[in-house]
Image (cartoon, helix red, strand yellow):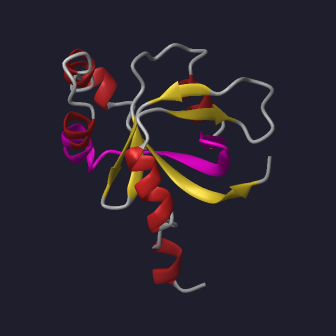
Amino acid sequence: MTKEASRRVRRFSRAVATALDKSKIIGVRAGLQSPHRFIGIWVVVVAGRVFARSWTRRPDGWFAAFLEDPLGVIEMGSGRIRVRAVRASGIRDAVERAYAQKYSTPASLKDVRGFRTPRRRDTTIEFIPLGVLRK
């Protein structure tokens, strides 16, 4: 594999990224064969890449679970996609703007403002697709 090819990041297909962008809540589970249930989270799409932030940093939460084992599954509708969670840093401002644009209802504004705090910015995760799972 060339050096350039090894730097390429796998992306979701345009159709999947669009569907994720339209979804207000998706399910996420750390661990490919985890016995844990799916947790509903907010995701945003920036330049075709999929990001999420954790509201809490509980040691038993989804963010901590992905730090321990970066492989997992996202669930949208009836589909499941294997993913790798990667901490993201250089794109955090764009992620904040995407949250503000997507979750703009009066009830969501408090949460969107809360996602701007340094401790929540630090939980920015990018989901990299690994492949579709059959149910």
Q: Is residue 37 above or below residue 80?
A: above
Tell me where residue 4 appears, x and y as whole percent: 45, 82
**Image point (80%, 46%), residue name:** 135
Q: Is residue 82 magenta?
A: yes
Question: Residue 82: percent from the left, percent from the top?
Answer: 67, 51
Asked if residue 122 lies left or right of residue 93, the reply is right
Q: Residue 14: x and y, percent?
A: 44, 66
- The part of the chain drawn in magenta is 72-97
Q: Based on the displayed image, in which of its 4 quarters is residue 73 positioned?
A: top right
Q: Indicate the quadrant containing the N terminus: top left, top right, bottom left or bottom right.
A: bottom right
Residue 125 on the magenta span: no
Left or right, 68 with respect to 43, comes to: right
In the rendered image, which quarter is residue 39 located in? Answer: top right
111 relative to 20, above or below: above
- Most extreme residue toward the bottom is 2
Between residue 96 and residue 87, name the one nearer to us: 96
Residue at 37% x, 61% y is 48
Identify the residue at horizontal 27%, vertical 25% (top origin). 115
Looking at the image, is 134 positioned above or below residue 87? below
Q: Nearer the viewer, residue 21 or 89?
A: 21
x and y, in percent, of residue 18 in the image: 41, 57
Residue visible at 38% across and 37% down in the picture: 124
Looking at the rendered structure, the number of numbered marks drawn on it comes to: 0
Q: Give the answer, above or below, for where 128 lies relative to 106.
A: below
